[in-house]
Amino acid sequence: MGGILGDSIGVREEIIQKACKLSMKAHEKSPGKPYVHEKNRGPTEAFFAFPGSWAVEDWYSRRAFGEIKVDVSKFPSIKSVGNDETGLVNEAFSRRFEDLLSGSSLATEVEKAISDRKQIVFAGHSAGGPMAILASIWFFEKYIRFNHYQIPPFCLTFGSPLAGNHIFSHALRRENWARYFIHFVMSRDIVPRIMLAPLSNVEQGLQFILEFLNPKSPHYLMYEPTVASNFLLSVMRNALSVASRAACYLKGCTNLLLETVASIVELSPYRPFGIFVFCTGNGKLVVLDNPDAVLQLLFFCLQLSPEEENSEFVHGMFRQHLAYESELQESLTMQDVTFLVNLVDVPLSADARTNDAAALNDLGLTTRARLCLRAAGELEKQKLENQKKIDSNKDTVKEVLKKIQEYKTSCEIRKVGYYDAFKIQKENADFNVNVKRQELTGILDEIVEMIRRYELPDRFEGRKEWIELGTLFRRLVEPLDIANYYRHLMNESTGPYMVKGRPKRYRFTQRWLEHAERTPAGFSSETTFWAEVEELRVKPYAQVRDKVLRLEEQVVTWVGGGLLGKDIFLDESTFTKWWRTLPFDHRSGSCLAGFISK
């Protein structure tokens, strides 16, 4: 599919060119200036362009790939919500950004641009790219997520190395932020591939390469063929391992040799995210936003064609890293743009006469590479099919929850809480609702398992309808699960419900709500009330006094907010019976004294 680049990615061509120009200019101003800030003369944009770094320690820490968990205090969204898996970021890049944020006037100048109602554009070339990426996420977290500002920033990078693992792509897609991260990559630029190799494999050559690329170095553009060739070989050998392992996953096959190698050899955790614009080198642009497909392109585009000399190829891949400004000037004028949207139908033959086929030929893609693109498209298609299947159960879930709500109401009419009624199991209605409970838990368990294996679209956990449905399910059904757990004395063999017995379906749905409402972990724990009661009531008061006081305070909040029903205060309630056994001094001063009859 063809079209105008700016119209499709939401950024005007002059903004792209300006961002690229300033990113190159930022190198010249470094290290004196940590970034270049320039307002557009028009009334709408404010640019922040970050320089790269030409020191190895600013690319890798001393670990194999130099990754650490993101700082959740600054980047709380960079996680898989249900799985509670925090994203990994390059430590050296993260440290540079932390120093930038704390040691410069960036935050102040961003605030000023916001007060002027500017469209913020963060940009960076080479190692300046990760600074632009982290600054953009920081902005989204601080201003957009909390609705303090309604104009999302754009992040434009040029030849940027990879900075985060697959959780970055997952989280940015879930939050609907990924489309604001636009990465321009020359098809044979080595720099975007470097982080696919561990430091031990590239350390000797990396400093030489950085000196070659550093415009202020005495070794700028001084080419050493042997070092460059060895560096390329090391990077591409590791890129092959990463791409091959990913391709096996995409195709659903299990290669025992690859699995064995992967268990011995540590593979790079870094993965692409956002929109990638590949510059073919002849003025054409190829655009795609499937991170699995981008990973394959990063490997397959950087292959020596039969008619090329090795020295010419190697020299070119370094020079391309410095050619973004001129290349984009030509490409944005030509507007020969191909958007790879329907990956499942990409042509396998180089002879096919379509726009997509011509673009793939320009990238030099083999049939194997095209099959990998198709596999990436098929995986994305399968995730949408899985979501469609899950969505087909929504009406069933709603109808069964309605039946459970009716059961809860009928119990209250009989002056017995539905937790206790279900635990005692005296009536046919108790048996019938147990069947309904099992039907619902089966549906939610299937959803959780798909999320755990990343088999649903990344946006699924951010969908309002499922967050609300999951919350209603948790509030109505988890008390029944707890009743069933303690009715069968499973606590005696397995341990406390909250420690060993709580199913993932409730942990996941609780995290969905807490993330959506931006509340701390554990804030929405009202559905575990009965598990707390069951554990507290079998222990001496002196041993659990503080926990009892805390629970009472929570009950007041939960009941006042309508999150916990007043049926817990009925005379025959397990909670009421236990509470009345507490010492008189405690009961007389309790915040619940007014709720429970003497």
Image: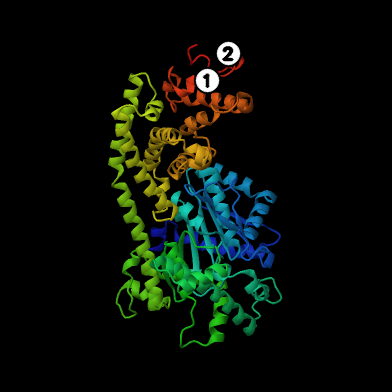
Residue located at (63% from left, 58% from top): 91
Q: Can the viewer see residue 186?
A: no
Residue located at (43% from left, 66% from top): 249
Q: Quadrant of the N terminus?
A: bottom left
Residue located at (48% from left, 23% from top): 575
**Observer-nearest residue: 445 or 166?**
445
Instruction: Give residue 29's quadrant in the image.
Output: bottom right
Q: Residues within 10 Å of mark 2 (few under 14, many from 20)?
A: few
Where residue 80 sits in the image (x, y, percent)? 49, 50
Residue located at (37% from left, 29% from top): 422
Q: Which mark is residue 245?
A: none
Residue ID for mark 1: 579
Give the alpha-carbon distance from disc 2 to disc 1, as whole Å: 11 Å
575 shown above or below 128: above
Say which element carries label 1.
helix
Q: Which mark is residue 588?
A: 2
Say which element carries label 2.
helix
**Observer-nearest residue: 436 or 359?**
436
Instruction: Give residue 441's quadrant in the image.
Output: top left
355 shown above or below 539: below
Looking at the image, is mark 2 or mark 1 earlier in the sequence?
A: 1
Where residue 554 sits in the image (x, y, percent)? 53, 27
Instruction: Give residue 27's quadrant in the image.
Output: bottom right
